[in-house]
């Protein structure tokens, strides 16, 4: 059974709604899933999963600081131990655009994580279509 980790940050709930949809999708595909806010997530969580899904709002065309902090706190402990571990990401933005996702890709590249699927981007409150895509993303990661 796949063990998935979802790490996300959300201030006004949009990214959190996406995270919960990813969680539901992964659970219903039979995975064991840990859903963690970035401030509570640790390097051990990253070591202890088969795949990770990262969710962030777009802040100034970058990931939220709390997500960056999670990566900053984790690098030394996981370097060389998570090579090619699959990841995917999702993001919520006020005006659209995927630059926050690009920033996640860039950092995941430094961790040698392997992008498994294209990310999901929402503008504002996630629509039912976006939430469905998030569920699918969780389901696909669970079946890797
Ligand atoms: C500090 C801050 C910076 C933001 N910068 C951007 C931005 O550069 N581009 C954009 O499209 N939205 C920007 N937004 C809007 C958020 O990305 C958007 O409201 C998002 O849905 C918030 O997600 P949340 O509800 O999970 O907190 C910003 C919001 C905040 C609070």
Image (cartoon, rainbow, N blue to C red):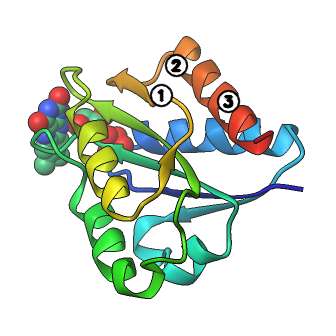
Give how far across and how far down residue 16 sits, in percent.
49, 45
- Within the image, what quadrant is residue 21 found in? top right
Identify residue for label 1: 118
Give how far across and how far down residue 3 sits, in percent.
77, 60
Q: Is residue 134 visible?
A: yes
Residue located 43% across and 41% down the image: 15
Q: Quarter holding the C terminus?
A: top right
Q: Earlier in the sequence, mark 3 or mark 2?
A: 2
Q: Ligand 1 near label 1 (Cβ, under 8 Å)?
A: no
Mark 2 secondary-structure assignment = helix
Nearer to us: label 1 or label 2: 1
Mark 1 secondary-structure assignment = loop
Identify residue for label 2: 130
Picture quadrant of ligand 1? top left
Mark 3–mark 2 Cα distance, whole angstroms, equals: 9 Å
Q: Quarter holding the N terminus?
A: bottom right
Which residue of the protein is positioned furthest toward the top in this rendering? 129
Residue located 54% across and 69% down the image: 82
Residue located 42% across and 78% down the image: 79
């Amino acid at each position: 059974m796949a063990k998935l980790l979802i790490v996300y940050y959300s201030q006004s709930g949009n990214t959190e709604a996406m995270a919960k949809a990813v969680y539901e999708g992964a659970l219903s595909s039979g995975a064991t899933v840990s859903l963690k806010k970035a401030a509570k997530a640790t390097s051990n969580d990253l070591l202890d999963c088969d795949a990770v899904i990262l969710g962030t709002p777009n802040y100034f065309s970058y990931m939220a600081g709390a997500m960056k902090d999670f990566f900053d706190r984790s690098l030394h402990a996981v370097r060389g131990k998570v090579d090619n571990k699959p990841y995917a990401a999702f993001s919520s933005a006020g005006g659209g655009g995927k630059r926050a996702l690009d920033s996640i890709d860039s950092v995941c590249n430094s961790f040698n994580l392997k992008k498994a699927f294209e990310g999901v981007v929402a503008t504002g409150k996630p629509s039912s279509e976006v939430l469905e895509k998030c569920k699918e993303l969780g389901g696909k990661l669970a079946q890797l």
